[in-house]
Amino acid sequence: MNEFIPSVDFIIELVTIRRQFHRYPELAYQEFETTKTIATCLNSWGLNLSPFKNLQTGGFCDVGKGPIIAFRADIDALPITENPDHLIKSENPGIMHACGHDYHITFGLAILKYFHLNQANLKHTIRVIFQPAEEAYPTGAVKVCSENIWQNIRYFVTAHMQNDLPVGTIAFCPGIANASSSSIEITLIGRGGHTSRPHETDDLVLHTANFISDLTTFLKSKINPFDSYTLVFGSLQGGTTHNVIPERITLKGTLRTLSEEVYKQILKLIADFCQSFEKSFHVKILLENPTYCPPVINDQKLGRKLKDFFSTYYPEKLVLLSTPSLGADDFAFYLTKAPGIYLKVGGEGKGIAHSSDFEINEASFAEGIAHLINFIAFLDTETR
Ligand SMILES: [Zn+2]
Ligand SMILES: [Zn+2]
């Protein structure tokens, strides 16, 4: 193997770019300055960012010729105020790269620069897709997948920084890597009134409390214990003050499963439960399921290639994960177009993802980028 070991100058350049993205994070579908910075970097290396037709932010860039190996880099940040004690911190109030996407964008740029400078023997096109709105509903991947850029894709690769893995490691979960995620909205509607006369109303707050508890027990009694799932409500909205019984209460939650079959089964059970609750308590219930992101399923053949590659060249660096994450990733939509693999890069930082304390160890950068480039270069050597 012609091993790529990044030079100190290359790492300094990339760390500087990464810090720029970290300082100026932008929310989903608002990544205008981020997109400009990506385009400016690429232009300075003699490359161009092609815009998407159906999106105002993000874009893609190709290097080389032939069948395509595509790397997905998500570019959006989250509505979180960063811990002010961080050395490199957000300068956009209330917005933070708290999921490592500043690293992912920089990985994408590094891959393009490397293969642009070393394209003489490339057998494939290396495409990097800078995808907006991974964190949002509707998710950016669905819109990117509606673009006409999928002919001739051989493989998809993506990588996510992972704070709970040591610096220098790369991890993947054979088979299912991430759960499906779907939003569930349930609205209970009934007669409101004075809290002194609950018997003349439908006392919706009490019914809602019972609804959550009874639904949880009902699902537990109906689902095979080996079929993992979570249904957790993150928002409960209703009522205005202490002495008015509301006429409407809305619950919003997320259902996560490891297969589409279990997702469909649970959705049907929730609908059945809502119907029987309506009949028993004479309230009306609206059930909505506005979004669904499928599970991320790593391609078996690519998984074997990854194992072979790392066990041959970097045996101590590969971490094989035995259980999937219940966190979803819209990379799943790409996998409906071509086989792919979802990798995790050891970040060994502080705080948990999606929190104000989240901070990745910058020392993870050099080995992370080297692993990704060397693995993509290994895939490039394949001929059909
Ligand atoms: Zn995230
Ligand atoms: Zn993320």
Image (cartoon, grey):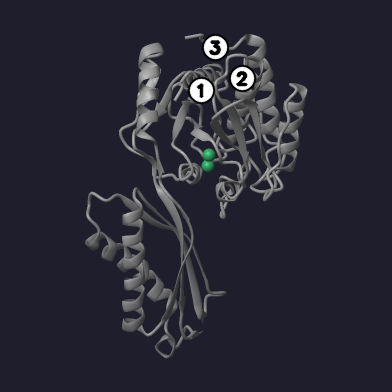
Sequence-wise, which precedes: disc 3 or disc 1? 3
Under circle 2, the secondary element is: helix
> At which x and y percent is residue 114?
62, 18
The residue identified by callout 2 is 115
Asked whether the beta carbons under mark 1 and mark 2 sit within 8 Å of each other, the answer is yes
- The label shown at residue 255 is none
326 up-or-down from 248: above or below: above
> At which x and y percent is residue 286?
45, 74
* Amino acid type, label 2: Phe
* Amino acid type, label 3: Phe
Sequence-wise, which precedes: disc 1 or disc 2? 2
Spatial CA distance of label 3 from label 2 is: 11 Å
Q: Which mark is nearer the camera, 3 or 1? A: 1
Q: Residues within 10 Å of mark 2 (few under 14, many from 20)?
A: many
Q: Residue at x 61, y 19 (%)?
A: 115
The residue identified by callout 1 is 376
Marker count (numbered)? 3
Left-right relation of 184 to 46: left
Spatial CA distance of label 1 from label 2 is: 10 Å
Q: Residues within 10 Å of mark 1 (few under 14, many from 20)?
A: many
Left-right relation of 126 to 259: right
> At which x and y percent is residue 250?
49, 70
- The label shown at residue 4 is 3
Q: Residue at x 68, y 49 (%)?
A: 55
Q: Residues within 10 Å of mark 3 (few under 14, many from 20)?
A: few
Q: Residue furthest bottom?
A: 200
Asked whether the beta carbons under mark 3 and mark 2 sit within 8 Å of each other, the answer is no
Spatial CA distance of label 3 from label 1 is: 11 Å
